[in-house]
Image: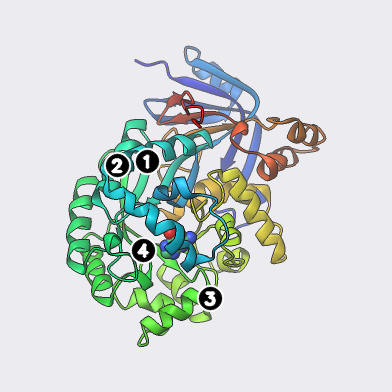
Amino acid sequence: MDAGDLLIGHTFEVSGDAMASPWQEVVRINSAGAVFIRGGRIIEIGDRKSLKAAHPHARVADYGDHLICPGFVDAHVHYPQTAIIASWGKQLIDWLNTYTFPEEMRFSDPAYARLIADRYLDIALANGTTTACSYATIHPGSVNAYFEAAEARGMRCVAGKTCMDRNAPQGLQDTAQSAYDDSKVLLQHWHGRGRATYAITPRFSPTSTPEQLSAIGALWEEFPDCLMQTHLSEQPQEISWVRSLFPEARDYLDTYERHGLLGARAVFGHAIHLEPREIDRIAETGAALVHCPTSNSFIGSGLMDVAGLTARGIPLGLATDTGGGSSFSMLRTMAAAYEIAQLRGTALHPAQLMYLATAGSAKALHLNTRIGTLAAGFEADLTVLNLYSTTAIAQRAERANNPWEALFPTIMMGDDRAIADVWIAGQRRVNTLASPTP
Ligand code: GUN
Ligand code: ZN
């Protein structure tokens, strides 16, 4: 029998919802921690002394002062936008038309889709992200490329074919029927296969006719176990457009609900400019929202009310929203979440930021019994943080009076240099990110 691996270091431990209850009651850092993993799973977590005694033959990875965390879970990305990240000067609708749609057209070529899927996942892993929930493009080949690339790395992943049958270039439109048919074939192939989850994916109401939304809603009713992901209330101009396209709807959320696209397994990205009725309805149905803070400032969208929404018990994930977001790093994303909350008068604690990037995102994706927490029975996806990765960070961390103060400079100033190691399903992953070519 395999002797297993014993990882020694400081451990980030969560036993509840750090947004719904006082974080002090549910999150701690154990500075004498250890994690024992075998067969792709976490078998035991606890104090290093007792775990060493219990597993004397285990291979030991001693990480010293590093912080062993659950792998980061990025709850909303567009992997096809990898190559256009950091494109200058536009707000949402112009940004989509100028940068995004031309790039997404290129994904009609499955070889290009695979090239970018591989590139995206290598960058994500180098940043400590072990699961990313991605939109593909309208092309079924772009969905296969992403799932295949994740499968090749052993990664748990979520993705779906983006559906659009209006207000997009000709080469980037499907129909109500083909969106239904193609999504059905893809979800029957991928959903629950290995570590894959399928998310039925209408891009957003402006790019789907009511007929398409209805067809996709019917598909979700047939396969209620799948997730449904889309965008909601990101920018005021977008919301006005939705109002003119759906005059019969009560509000933006209703454009989804009236077509069967609201429920506990719905995941809405952005959700910044919500009406009180929409918030009530989201809370009632148990749908999740995803905070995309670097994107919301980069595209000029606004400041999500994280404290107010989580106080309503709404599950909240955290995401880069690559490439509307300006970073692949969940550390940078936590920093942006901190800054945006500050602008709204709330100081999110490092325990809460880390919770959102791990168990919180996993909960939004209904994967919180499998990933996002260091606990017995969970899949062994781990990210090990070096809290002294640069001179600037180290000199601040050295002054720390407690573990949270030691972690916070890495959240605020850290990048891929802080990622000491990543484990996927119990396998230590050597960082194979190729050096950039000119
Ligand atoms: N709304 C519809 N599509 C997109 C997209 O690709 N990125 C962002 N940020 N918002 C969207
Ligand atoms: Zn998005």
Given contact means CB atoms under 8 Å apart, are the residues at marks 2 and 1 in contact?
A: yes
Viewer can see residue 279? no
Cα–Cα span, label 1 and label 3: 32 Å
- The quadrant the N terminus occupies is top left
* Residue drawn at point x = 68 percent, y = 39 percent: 410
Query: What's the mark number on residue 236?
Result: 3
Is the C-beta separation of discs 1 and 3 under 8 Å?
no
20 or 70, nearer to the observer: 70
Q: Tag 4: residue type? A: Arg
Judging from the image, what secondary structure is the residue with disc 2 in? helix
Of the residues under marks 4 and 1, which one precedes in the sequence? 1
Alpha carbon separation for disc pair 4 and 2: 19 Å
Q: CA distance from mark 4 to mark 1?
A: 19 Å
Residue tagged 4: 203
Query: Is the CB of the residue bearing disc 1 within 8 angstroms of ligand 1?
Result: no
Residue shown at the point (43%, 31%) measured from the top left: 424
The image shows residue 66, relative to residue 224, as above or below, that is: above
Residue at the front extreme of this rendering: 438
Q: Position of residue 151 (x, y in %)?
A: 31, 35
